[in-house]
Image (cartoon, rainbow, N blue to C red):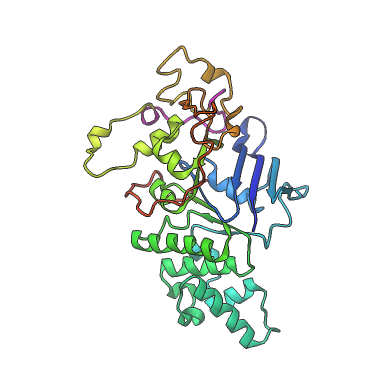
Amino acid sequence: MTTLETRDLTVRFGRGDSTLVAVDGVDLTVAEKTIVGLVGESGSGKSTLARAIVGLASISDGHVLLDGVAMRRRSSGHVSGLNRRVQMVFQDPFASLNPRMTVGAAIAEAAGTGRRTRRAVRAKEVAELLELVHLDQAVTRELPSRLSGGQRQRVAIARALAVRPEVLIADEITSSLDVSVQSAVLNLLRDLRAELGISILFVSHNLATVRYVSDALAVMYLGRLVEAGPTEAVVSEPQHPYTRSLLGAVPQLGVSIRDVGTSTLDAVEPPDPRHPPNGCHLHPRCPVGPMVDPTRQICIEDDPREGAAERLHRAACHFAPKQPGANGTSRFESTALAPPQSTARVARRLDHGNDD
């Protein structure tokens, strides 16, 4: 199958003083047959990154690569050649499906089996795709308005799979679903990875959800990737203060809210994304940065991302814990990507609605 990569990917909106750098030099890899979770607060840039990968947002700098080959960018900044190889499933399936087309017609259209194709061939193609997403054939004749939210999302996934993509990008596809339905959709993604061997980039704000479904985890803050690595390594021993703060917001059984306390991250308002701080973007809110320890001026002066990409479990922080192994490398460098745990803790949402 296929490995998807972004190299120094940057997306800017506006000009001059009003320029917003929504995605700032992101290096991300989705290895073949792997589910990578992308998490961050609202406005972190994760949805913009996903849209840029599939060509729905113009790329200002950097590249999108498939199996090491850079996809050509048109003069508009949009990538070409990804239509069939990389497909995206959106947060709101009702908005992404034509309300006047039946489920069968919508899937057949995506599969390219038009009216000139024999009816039996179209019906077989649609039936196979519906079976793949665990939907009854009876929904073929239904309009999207007659389906539940979970059913509509499965239809949207079936449409994306109709062209046999090599990479699937799922953008907040469970955020509007009930918890029980969320679990079914997440299990479906894992089944599809196993059955089809596709790579998946799963975008979400819910850390418990991401932990359940993903092999690797990437964390974004203010357009930058601040931590990435094997999911259980990032969750059990987070190296970046922002990741630790996000994990601290996840309620745990037996722990009172008043016991959790507040961090600098909660006490300080996020900066204006049009005028991000110098150095480390987190430093005005960081619980271990110069606002707490004035001697740590390096956080204000230098970009901490330099050299972080050399490690399997990487963190863009000048003061990330260093835990050398026998060969002097990070203890997570030799850790293989392990399957996600089957049990996830219940977590409140870090934000609501669309990401960007």
| Residue lying farthest to the top in this orientation | 295
Residue at image location 54% in from the left, 64% down from the top:
96
Q: Image quarter for residue 98?
A: bottom right
Could you tell me residue 37's position as x and y percent?
50, 48
Could you tell me residue 346's position as x and y percent?
32, 50
Q: Quadrant of the N terminus?
A: bottom right
Q: Nearer the viewer, residue 313 or 250?
A: 313
Q: Image quarter for residue 342?
A: bottom left
Q: Nearer the viewer, residue 278 or 101?
A: 278
| Residue lying farthest to the front in this orientation | 326
Q: Which residues are magenta?
A: 265-280
Question: Relative to residue 91, is residue 220 depicted above or below?
Answer: above
Residue at image location 52% in from the left, 44% down from the top:
336
Question: Relative to residue 29, is residue 164 depicted above or below?
Answer: below
Q: Image quarter for residue 84?
A: bottom right
Could you tell me residue 56's position as x and y percent?
64, 53
Reply yes or no: does residue 272 show up in magenta.
yes
Left or right: residue 308 versus residue 256 is right
Is residue 52 visible to the viewer in this orientation of the structure?
yes
Question: Relative to residue 310, is residue 196 depicted above or below?
Answer: below
Reply yes or no: does residue 301 show up in magenta.
no
Q: Nearer the viewer, residue 271 or 237?
A: 237
Is residue 219 visible to the viewer in this orientation of the structure?
no
Marker count (numbered)? 0
Could you tell me residue 60's position as x and y percent?
69, 40
> Is most of the magenta stretch helix, strand or loop?
loop
Residue at image location 65% in from the left, 44% down from the top:
6
Question: Relative to residue 182, is residue 137 depicted above or below?
Answer: below
